[in-house]
Amino acid sequence: MGVLRYFTVSLFLLCNYNFVTADNKVVCYYDSSASYRTGQGKFELSFLDNALQFCSHLIYGYAGIDEKTNKLKALDEVLDLNQHNYQKVTDLKRRFPGLKIFLSVGGGKDGTYDDDRKVAKYLELLESADKRTTFINSADSFLRTYGFDGLDLSWEFPETKPKKKRGKISGWFNSLKKKIVGEDEVDEKAGEHKEEFTALVRDLKNKFKHEGLSVSLSVLPNVNSTVYYDPTIAQYLDLIIVKAFDFHTPKRNPKEADYPTPLFSVFDRRFDENADYQVRYWSEHGTPRNKIILAIPSFARTWKMTEDSGLTGVPPLTVEGEGLEGPYTKTPGLLSHPEVCNKLTNIDIKHKLVKTGDPTGRHGVFAYRTVDNNNPEGIWIAYEDVDSAGSKASYARERGLGGIAIDDLTLDDFRGLCSGNKYPVLRAARLKL
């Protein structure tokens, strides 16, 4: 009897190992601008229902900062305020008890890609204690008015400079230069901004704790954590969501395609251009692992292959800017999960893709179509399939992280167009937790 009881208890502990090592949070991003897409790409609010059964948190994007008043503001007043989308979203908590819904500010959406003020106004707000206080008070009122549970800081900081495509000789000289004078500065006041951001997060938390509101940080792609985030801010944050993707994109790297979302280090790449390094930075500097969330993209990055790209598709390879837009997202250089799937299942020889898996689990999967007589339009696509998404969720579980995030629900296959399964990336990642 004692042996049987010992076996039963041991089996229970083994089966519940995940619950001991990780919190199994699933943070789901929802970019409301997807409601303006047309056809099969249009995302209706009702599509959230099939996803939220798997989500512990929903992050609504995106709000911004009013440059004149330094207050939190809706970026889309028609949708969010006039059509009451804020209220409709937070009302979802009635049907999904336990779901936490945060409002995200920034996220690369508060301005256009080449807008100089896009980042500048976020830095200028940090530089003034009065502006920070104004922002905090407005955020507190804003969240309580619309019923949000917290604020996600997808704060706009200057991105690192992309790696340039160089020859062997120029690459050697550039490496020597960095050793002598260091990396090129993208923000001469970075040290001050780091301290000021810490003050903002601390004061936000102190204000919010009286209202029972939460604060999360979304570490945006290509923002140097060592430069802008003092690890001590973890004590003031409920979640730290590491967006370890888009290290290479068609906009940042128009002449060279390479893995945008490696899990581990890749040969001849910056040491920090992988998810493992980004996670370890936070955990090794004192952040409790159960606060760290690893984000998994549901979209693909695409480049236009040329005759100079070669035949193997193995990166890095010479390319010519962004791949053609997809029928649903209509954004050059980006494809949603169903758009990739449709390309992979197309049997027309002129559109047929070659898919290459990732048996090492290090760099992610890709598919490509070379340029030849049959294929005048070449394309190189890097993305997360259900296996690679599951691998990243397994990584989060095995290292005792707080969970994973899916960015973005509206780019997953929310209609089930490909296999009939809705939200395959979300489902695959959740299953591995």
Image: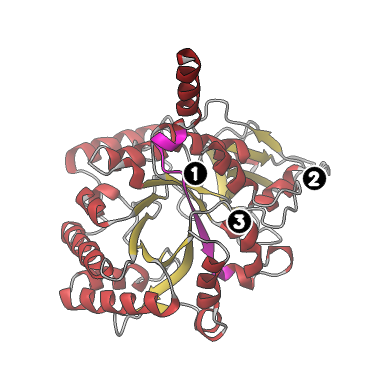
Point out residue 75 in the picture as x, y percentages from the top left corner.
46, 77
Task: Tell me the tag on residue 51.
Answer: 3
Q: CA distance from mark 2 to mark 1?
A: 24 Å
User: Is residue 22 one of those drawn in magenta?
Assistant: yes
Q: Earlier in the sequence, mark 3 or mark 1?
A: 3
> Given the image, on which type of amino acid does mark 3 rest?
Ala
Q: Please report the residue visible at 52 percent of the width from the left and 66 percent of the height from the top.
A: 93
Point out residue 110 in the picture as x, y percentages from the top left corner.
42, 71
Q: Which residues are magenta?
A: 18-33
Task: Tell me the tag on residue 346.
Answer: 2
Q: Earlier in the sequence, mark 3 or mark 2?
A: 3
Looking at the image, the residue that sits furthest to the front is 1
* Badge 3 vs badge 1, beta-carbon distance below 8 Å: no
Task: Tell me the tag on residue 260.
Answer: 1
Point out residue 105 in the picture as x, y percentages from the top left corner.
39, 68
> Given the image, on which type of amino acid does mark 2 rest?
Asn
Q: Is residue 25 above or below residue 173?
A: below
